[in-house]
Image: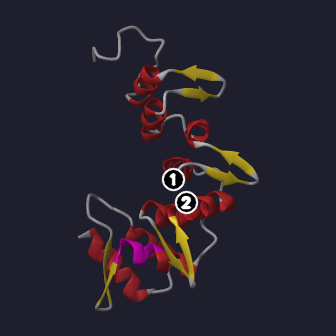
């Protein structure tokens, strides 16, 4: 079982930030977390441990944000603070932009982004990011790379169709 392999790898190298991050992630349909050296770690504890070992990886901060935030080296971070920290370290993370949007938006590099602007920025970075298209559509649509997408066009994009192609959204 793959989860057991991750647990064993952390037994051999408990200072592997990447190992803790992977164990915390929802991997292959299994809930994140596991048992290392007889101690149980839930998803949040795995991400906190990964960040204790390597606090400079934006993706790890984003992961902690998606589980509601946590405590890293004595500092408490809510989900929004985690996403902001992730984007401060790596502004090219579409998932972190989508997470920040879900948290209501926020300031990144001195610029204020509302929810819709966060979704738009995530899609600028990764136009195949399905969840960002769905959420942008739910927010009323928006502009991605200079082009306006109404809510139905956003859903079309989420389903992998270009809105210019024939057939309506409901006939697939």
**Residue 78, position in %: x, y?**
52, 67
Q: Main secondary structure of the magenta part?
A: helix
Judging depth in this view, the residue of 63 and 79 nearest the camera is 79
Q: Quadrant of residue 53 in the image?
A: bottom right
Residue 79 is marked as none
Magenta span includes 57: no
Which residue is located at x 51 percent, y 78 percent? 71
Q: Is residue 62 left or right of residue 45?
A: right
**Residue 119, position in %: x, y?**
55, 39
The span from disc 1 to disc 2 (Cα, nearest Å) is 6 Å
The region drawn magenta spans 42-47
- Label 2 crowding class (10 Å Cα cut-off): few <14, some 14-19, many 20+? many
Disc 1 + disc 2, Cβ < 8 Å: yes
Give the labeled residue for mark 2: 80
Give the labeled residue for mark 1: 103
Residue 36 sits above or below residue 160 on the image? below
Which residue is located at x 64 percent, y 57 percent? 87
Query: Element type at marker 1?
Result: loop
């Amino acid at each position: 079982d793959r989860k057991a392999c991750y647990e064993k790898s952390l037994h051999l190298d408990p200072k592997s930030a990447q190992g803790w991050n992977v164990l915390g992630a929802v991997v292959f349909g299994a809930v994140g977390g596991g048992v290392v050296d007889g101690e149980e770690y839930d998803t949040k504890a795995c991400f906190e441990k990964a960040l204790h070992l390597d606090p400079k990886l934006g993706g790890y901060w984003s992961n902690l944000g998606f589980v509601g935030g946590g405590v890293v080296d004595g500092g408490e971070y809510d989900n929004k603070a985690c996403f902001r920290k992730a984007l401060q370290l790596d502004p090219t993370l579409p998932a972190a932009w989508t997470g920040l949007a879900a948290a209501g938006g926020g300031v990144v590099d001195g610029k204020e982004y509302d929810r819709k602007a966060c979704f738009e920025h995530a899609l600028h970075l990764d136009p195949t990011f399905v969840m960002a298209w769905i959420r942008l559509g739910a927010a009323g649509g928006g502009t991605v790379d200079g082009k306006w997408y109404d809510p139905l066009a956003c859903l079309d994009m989420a389903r992998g169709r270009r809105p210019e192609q024939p057939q309506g959204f409901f006939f697939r």
